Amino acid sequence: MTNKTPFSLEGKHILVTGASSGIGLSICRAIAASGGKVTGTARRSELLDNMVRELGRNRASFIEADLSLDAGIEKVTAAVPEINGLVYAAGISKLVPLKFIKRQQLEEIMNINYFSMVLLLAQLVRQKKIVKNTYSSIVLISSVAQQIGTKSSLLYTGSKGAMSAAGRVMANELSLQKIRVNTIEPGMVQTAMASEMEDILSKETVEQDKRQYPLGYGTPEDVANAAVFLLSDASKWMTGRSLTLDGGRYSLLD
Ligand SMILES: NC(=O)c1ccc[n+]([C@@H]2O[C@H](COP(=O)([O-])OP(=O)(O)OC[C@H]3O[C@@H](n4cnc5c(N)ncnc54)[C@H](OP(=O)(O)O)[C@@H]3O)[C@@H](O)[C@H]2O)c1
């Protein structure tokens, strides 16, 4: 008798971008805990090395790369073995009011949050690195920001809107090979990115925002558990869709 449930990642090898910290790191841990193998990528190799030591070399490996560069995308595509899934968690955020936005800021954020996601996926598909016809799964970490219109978030919101929209198109094209593409759209999750926001906004604004979340701010583990579901065969009938994780922030109103 076997204990393998459809939620298990046993026998699956997953590539995770943004694996050095926050949500990406937590997803690496959750993949290993669910029986899968993980290759993590990011720029800070010492943090990636820590991740591999923690999870063990039989479960984890890393590729150091700057994904905002074509060379970084090529390096990852060449080095990664055949995969059953990808989580794109690399990303940056910046709050800038519309009237102060410059082309260089737009290019910087679109580059890592959107262009590199598309170009990495395109390369992986072209080089036949994603196993076909076995419900392989691509998970894009977008944001609930793309469903709303928070002031000063245009740079970030635009990049995540593009990511979520592109996810649906990719899901359609890749469905021919039974490769699935879904997005996760989290609200505020306590990571370095969230702390940066807290440094910019006043303490009162942050406290007020926290009170708007019926279940409080999320943790990286909350997102990682949803990612495991989407990577596993438990979700094999799901593609081109989005999971909103926001502790009830935008669905439960007084
Ligand atoms: N925290 C939240 O509230 C929240 C909410 C919704 C969505 N998200 C999304 O979740 C994802 C992860 O964010 P997080 O909160 O976990 O923040 P984080 O801890 O700052 O993680 C960002 C990750 O992206 C990687 N990265 C950034 N630029 C890169 C580049 N040029 N090349 C390769 N890797 C790069 C970073 O690695 P290196 O610096 O080592 O390269 C890091 O691992 C992001 O896409 C973010 O938009 C976060």
Image: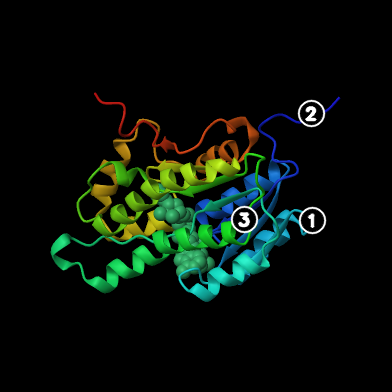
Q: Position of residue 247 (x, y in %)?
A: 40, 33
Amino acid type shown at disc 2: Asn
Residue designated by label 3: 15
The answer to whether residue 102 shows anywhere in this view is yes
Q: Amino acid at mark 3?
A: Leu
Of labels 3 and 1, earlier in sequence is 3
Few, some or many residues within 10 Å of mark 3 (<14, 14–19, 20+):
many
Instruction: Name the spot of residue 164 as percent of width and height, x first.
Output: 38, 46
Counting residues from the start of the chain, the first of labels 2 and 3 encountered is 2
Q: Nearer the viewer, residue 191 or 45?
A: 45
| Residues at circles 2 and 3 in contact by the CB criterion of under 8 Å | no
The quadrant of the picture occupied by the C terminus is top left
- According to the image, label 1 marks what residue? 58
Single out the mark in the foreground, 3 or 1: 3
Q: Which element type, helix, strand or loop, lies under badge 2?
A: loop
Percent x, y of residue 150: 23, 48
Q: Nearer the viewer, residue 218 or 127?
A: 127
Q: Residue 97, relative to residue 87: is it above or below?
A: below
Q: Is 84 placed left or right of 201 in the picture?
A: right
